Image: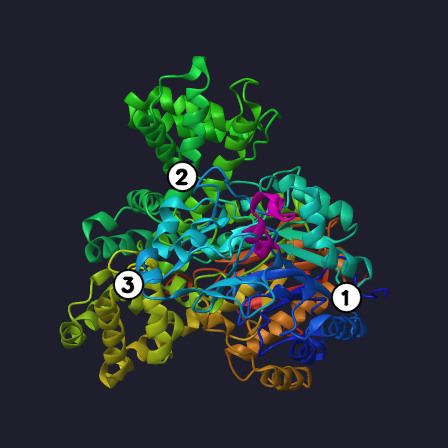
């Protein structure tokens, strides 16, 4: 099959495949997606996942396309239809881990290892420490300690199949050869795996996993044989022209992300490859990673920042300080406490394995001896807590990159300043992490280099993304993957500098505003960001709402003020919302915060109090009328933010992705709320009406017009936005207009801080400079001559403009 689709996308559209929306359902979307200008359908994972999977990241078989989604034939049919519309496919690849399914026999590679241990042909697939757990693979699946499980007959030997298995409810485990005739307690002890209470995992797990998810076991794709076995089918489909590109899930978990990407690029020449790499602050993607760029969280952070009003920082900080308990007021302190908590609990096994490795290296080397395990552990913990990014990029037996050296040196200096008595241990850990301690025992020292980096990522992800972001709630729209909630806004100079660098370094990187992993959709964020423009008014109304909700709060059991503050912001962002959706979201949020309840220590009374309070608030018509009135009050400014951020995302350097449904206003919250079905028929009807000349009926129509105009232009003129394109800021006399030029042919203009703009009387004499020529707005049809133009003339009907220079 030869694909007529371009190898490099001009725009992608993310589709979350589920058993209810398989390849046939995605195929039904293709004609519509082609009509709005999408060049590539971007699919969630397509390989065979665990039974009942709703996301696909729990792969169990790399040799099969998911039967629940439609199988290989269904994928080929989808590709054929996409190609007939000159569209291609990009698929999500999960190289870091695969599932421990129920029953375990569904994962044949894992089954082999559980049966045959380190002699299995698949033993090299998994990162298992066979020296621990009495040379057994820990399987923490039991609902309680193993003794009572055996005593009460919950674990049984089943001989009804071709081979005997140990059963524990829905779980099934193989029996090691020659042990089936043993008494049950002895039989259990003679296996290559250790059945254990699920709580044991956080302290004694002896295999690498995805973050703290024990049911997702890490895969060693750094091994060429493992890479070929786990990627063979997808690479073959790329070679046949079925798949044009790959999105790589969680590369930071890999032993060697650069090596993996080099192998993938060599095996899939011409493929468009982007990586789910979270860049913190001003961090840049390593220049030696052979890929087009990231999946766009860096773009999301800048776009959210440029739409945030810096004048709101002080009053919103004051409001948060008044609301929150003292330990939760300072971002740095909350982040540190969150990291320490996950290190001491859900990631303890990973940290202990790292400490054991470092202590063993010290004890076996006379030059490094006389450091205690306690001291080394303290140093490792301090380094992990202070580490500001998801990983360094040090490779064993290679000089460490200057950037990685700088980060580790800065972290060490900060830790030594905070704990001088640990200076020796901290320097030792730093030098181990940088591979500086000579050639002795190179295997274990190389392992430490890799394992330290593989531990930094989970600490950041679980400590910051999944804990701090649910605790520190000054303006929750900024609490986003790859974001910096304590960095309140982005200036136009910062924005332009970042965009120019993107064009020069990674012009074909993905840009995004919503993903399956974002904490809330782009439009929920945009509404909440408006609070930065009306901070004084927000403090007034939220105080009134709290007072009006006093009886509901008391009846629910005295809800903590932090969770209540999250709820009020969420109501503004997602209004209107039903009690069931809001309750589900809040329960997830408080479990992630890990203050009153958690996923592993659920306080059901507290969770019910949260749900009861939210339900009572939504049943109080007087109170909800106030919320609705405030949302209506800020909607003119929310409209500006929604349209502006979308046009920025679609026209800055990079390949824009539209998350399913987000071509209209979408008010989804964190997953699984953002995996709800998309009404494609409604979108198709809207587009046909707009194309037929109908005026926009609402904000969703306006957003669809922006999306379709920008994506169609990108498809028609890919060179204006591609690798050889240019990016140039447009001069203006006002900070309320942000504009830039792409390749001298397309001008994007958006409105900033509209509330403040209204307060100063509108655009008045504000001017913006366009190059000479005739420029026509792809959104409204209005045309202008280049020169120094009144901004009011450019933004008459919409708060944004997409100007295209006509041919001379």
Task: Work out whether 174 lies above or below 130.
Answer: below
Of the 4 image quadrants, the one containing the C terminus is bottom right
Q: CA distance from mark 3 to mark 1?
A: 53 Å
Of callouts 2 and 3, the N-terminal one: 2
> Which residue is more in the foreground, 107 or 96?
107
Q: Name the residue carrying label 3.
A: 602
Q: Position of residue 263 (x, y in %)?
A: 72, 44
What secondary structure is marked by label 1?
Answer: helix
Mainly helix, strand or loop, the magenta region?
Answer: helix
Of callouts 2 and 1, the N-terminal one: 2
Instruction: Locate residue 147 relative to residue 480 in the image: left or right.
Output: left
Task: Work out whether 131 lies above or below 106.
Answer: above
Q: Position of residue 635 (x, y in %)?
A: 41, 74
Instruction: Locate residue 262 relative to residue 731 in the image: left or right.
Output: right
Q: Residue furthest top?
A: 367
Q: Residues within 10 Å of mark 3 (few under 14, many from 20)?
A: some
Q: CA distance from mark 2 to mark 1?
A: 52 Å
Q: Position of residue 164 (x, y in %)?
A: 54, 63
Q: Nearer the viewer, mark 3 or mark 1?
A: 3
- Indicate whether residue 117 is drawn in magenta: yes
Of callouts 3 and 1, the N-terminal one: 3
Q: CB under 8 Å between callouts 2 and 1? A: no
Q: Name the residue carrying label 1.
A: 716
Stretch in magenta: 109-125
- Indicate whether residue 447 is drawn in magenta: no
Q: Name the residue carrying label 2.
A: 351
Q: CB under 8 Å between callouts 3 and 1? A: no
């Amino acid at each position: 099959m030869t694909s007529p689709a371009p190898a490099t996308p001009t725009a992608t559209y993310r589709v979350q495949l589920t058993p209810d929306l398989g390849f046939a359902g995605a195929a039904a979307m293709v004609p519509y997606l082609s009509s709005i200008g999408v060049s590539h359908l971007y699919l969630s994972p397509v390989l065979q996942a665990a039974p009942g999977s709703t996301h696909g990241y729990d792969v169990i078989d790399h040799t099969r396309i998911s039967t629940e989604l439609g199988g290989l034939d269904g994928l080929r049919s989808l590709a054929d239809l996409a190609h007939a519309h000159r569209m291609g496919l990009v698929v999500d690849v999960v190289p870091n881990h695969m599932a421990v399914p129920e029953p375990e026999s569904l994962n044949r590679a894992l089954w082999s290892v559980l049966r045959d241990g380190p002699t299995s042909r698949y033993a090299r697939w998994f990162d298992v420490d066979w020296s621990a757990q009495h040379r057994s693979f820990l399987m923490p699946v039991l609902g309680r300690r193993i003794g009572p499980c055996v005593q009460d007959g919950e674990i049984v030997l089943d001989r009804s199949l071709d081979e005997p298995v140990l059963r524990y409810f829905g779980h099934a485990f193989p029996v090691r050869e020659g042990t089936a005739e043993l008494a049950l307690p002895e039989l259990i002890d003679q296996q290559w795996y250790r059945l254990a209470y699920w709580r044991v995992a956080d302290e004694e797990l002896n295999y690498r996993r995805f973050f703290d998810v024990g049911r997702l076991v890490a895969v060693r794709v750094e091994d060429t044989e493992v890479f070929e076995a786990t990627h063979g089918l997808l690479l073959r489909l790329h070679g046949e022209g079925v798949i044009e590109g790959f999105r790589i899930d969680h590369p930071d978990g890999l032993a060697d992300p650069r090596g993996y990407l080099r192998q993938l690029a060599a095996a899939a020449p011409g493929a468009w490859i982007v990586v789910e790499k979270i860049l913190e602050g001003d961090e840049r993607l390593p220049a030696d990673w052979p890929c087009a760029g990231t999946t766009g969280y860096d773009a999301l952070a800048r776009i959210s920042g440029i739409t945030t009003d810096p004048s709101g920082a002080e009053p919103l900080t004051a409001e948060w300080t008044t609301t929150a308990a003292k330990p939760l007021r300072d971002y740095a302190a909350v982040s540190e406490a969150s990291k320490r908590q996950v290190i001491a609990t859900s990631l303890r096994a990973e940290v202990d394995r790292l400490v054991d490795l470092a202590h063993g290296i010290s004890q076996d080397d006379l030059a490094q001896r006389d450091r205690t395990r306690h001291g080394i552990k303290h140093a490792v913990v301090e380094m992990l807590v202070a580490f500001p990014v998801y990983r360094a990029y040090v490779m064993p037996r290679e000089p460490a990159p200057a950037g990685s050296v700088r980060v580790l040196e800065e972290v060490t200096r900060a830790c030594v300043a905070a704990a001088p008595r640990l200076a020796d241990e901290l320097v030792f850990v730093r030098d181990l992490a940088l591979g500086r301690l000579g050639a002795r025992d190179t295997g274990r020292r190389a392992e430490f280099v890799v394992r330290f980096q593989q531990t930094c990522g989970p600490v950041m992800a679980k400590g910051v993304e999944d804990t701090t972001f649910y605790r520190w709630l000054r303006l929750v729209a900024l609490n986003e993957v790859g974001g910096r909630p304590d960095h309140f806004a982005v200036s136009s100079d910062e924005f332009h500098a970042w965009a120019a660098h993107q064009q020069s370094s990674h012009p074909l990187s993905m840009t995004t505003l919503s993903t399956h992993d974002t904490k809330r959709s782009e439009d929920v964020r945009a509404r909440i960001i408006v609070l930065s423009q009306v901070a004084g008014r927000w403090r007034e109304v939220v105080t009134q709402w709290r007072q009006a909700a006093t009886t509901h709060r008391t009846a629910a059991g005295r809800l903590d003020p932090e969770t209540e503050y999250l709820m009020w912001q969420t109501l503004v962002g997602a209004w209107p919302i039903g009690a069931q959706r809001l309750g589900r979201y809040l329960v997830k949020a408080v479990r992630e915060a890990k203050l009153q309840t958690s996923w592993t220590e659920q306080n059901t009374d507290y969770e019910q109090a949260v749900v009861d309070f939210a339900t009572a608030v939504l049943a109080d018509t007087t109170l909800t009328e106030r919320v609705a009135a405030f949302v209506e009050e800020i909607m003119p400014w929310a409209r500006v933010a929604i349209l502006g951020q979308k046009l920025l995302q679609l026209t800055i350097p990079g390949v824009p992705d539209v998350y399913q449904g987000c071509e209209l206003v979408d008010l989804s919250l964190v997953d699984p709320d953002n995996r709800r079905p998309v009404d494609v028929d409604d979108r198709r009807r809207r587009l046909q009406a707009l194309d037929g000349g109908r005026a926009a009926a609402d904000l969703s129509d306006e957003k669809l017009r922006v999306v379709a105009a920008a994506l169609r232009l990108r498809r028609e003129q890919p060179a204006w936005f591609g690798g050889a394109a240019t990016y140039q800021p447009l001069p203006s006399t006002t900070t309320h207009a942000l504009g830039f030029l792409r390749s001298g042919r397309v001008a994007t203009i958006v409105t900033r801080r509209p509330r403040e703009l209204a307060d100063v009387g509108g655009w008045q004499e504000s001017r913006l400079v366009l190059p000479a020529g005739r420029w026509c707005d792809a959104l409204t049809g209005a045309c202008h001559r280049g020169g120094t133009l009144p901004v009011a003339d450019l933004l008459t009907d919409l708060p944004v403009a997409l100007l295209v220079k006509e041919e001379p």
